[in-house]
Amino acid sequence: MEINRNTIIKNLVKKHPETLSVFRKYNLVVAGGVRGPNEPLAFFAKAHEVDYDEIVKELKEAILAYDPPDEPEIDLGLPKLTKNQPNEDGQQQCRGKPTKGCWLPWPS
């Protein structure tokens, strides 16, 4: 999501909840919340006397710094897939037929 003058704060916080910390810094906790208005970022900055360029910089930094937790690997009991490797002649084959590539079950 690109951040620009027309970015709706509610949409930004919904897509990037990590940006809420930036709004909290300015004591604007309800910004973009469920009951928040559909304000574009430029209007919001002007109305709340916040430097537009500074808040954009901080929002981008918050997004870049966000390190989501690792999702646990879930074993569904399905075979793992591997991309078919080229044969000795350098030709891709899938089930004996020439192809640009295919995915096959991992060899057991």
Image: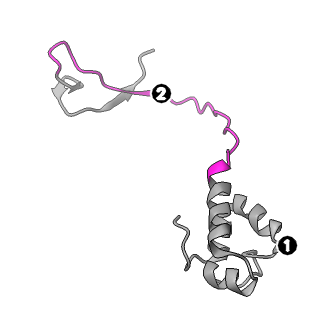
> Between marks 1 and 2, how big is the CA–CA gap?
49 Å
SS for dot 2: loop
Left or right of 19, for residue 75:
left
Give the colour scheme shown: one colour
For residue 80, the mark is 2
SS for dot 1: loop
Which one is in front in this view, the residue at disc 1 or the one at disc 2? 1
Q: How many C-alpha atoms fall within 10 Å of the one at disc 1: few (<14), some, or many (≥20)?
A: few
What is the magenta segment's predominant secondary structure? Answer: loop
The magenta stretch is 64-90
Q: Residue at x 81, y 66 (%)?
A: 25
Q: Is residue 38 visible?
A: no
Q: How many C-alpha atoms fall within 10 Å of the one at disc 2: few (<14), some, or many (≥20)?
A: few
Q: In the image, what residue type sits under mark 2?
A: Lys
Q: Is residue 18 above or below residue 38?
A: above
How many numbered tags mark residues here?
A: 2
Which of the marked residues, 1 or 2, is nearer the chain's N terminus? 1
State the residue lying farthest toward the right: 27
Q: Is residue 100 above or below residue 49?
A: above
According to the picture, the residue beneath numbered tag 1 turns out to be 27
Q: In the image, what residue type sits under mark 1?
A: Asn
Left or right of 98, for residue 18:
right
Tell me the quarter of the image containing the C terminus: top left
Q: Is residue 28 visible?
A: yes
* Among the 4 quarters of the image, the one containing residue 61: bottom right
| x then y, percent, for residue 98 | 15, 28
Q: Residue at x 70, y 62 (%)?
A: 19
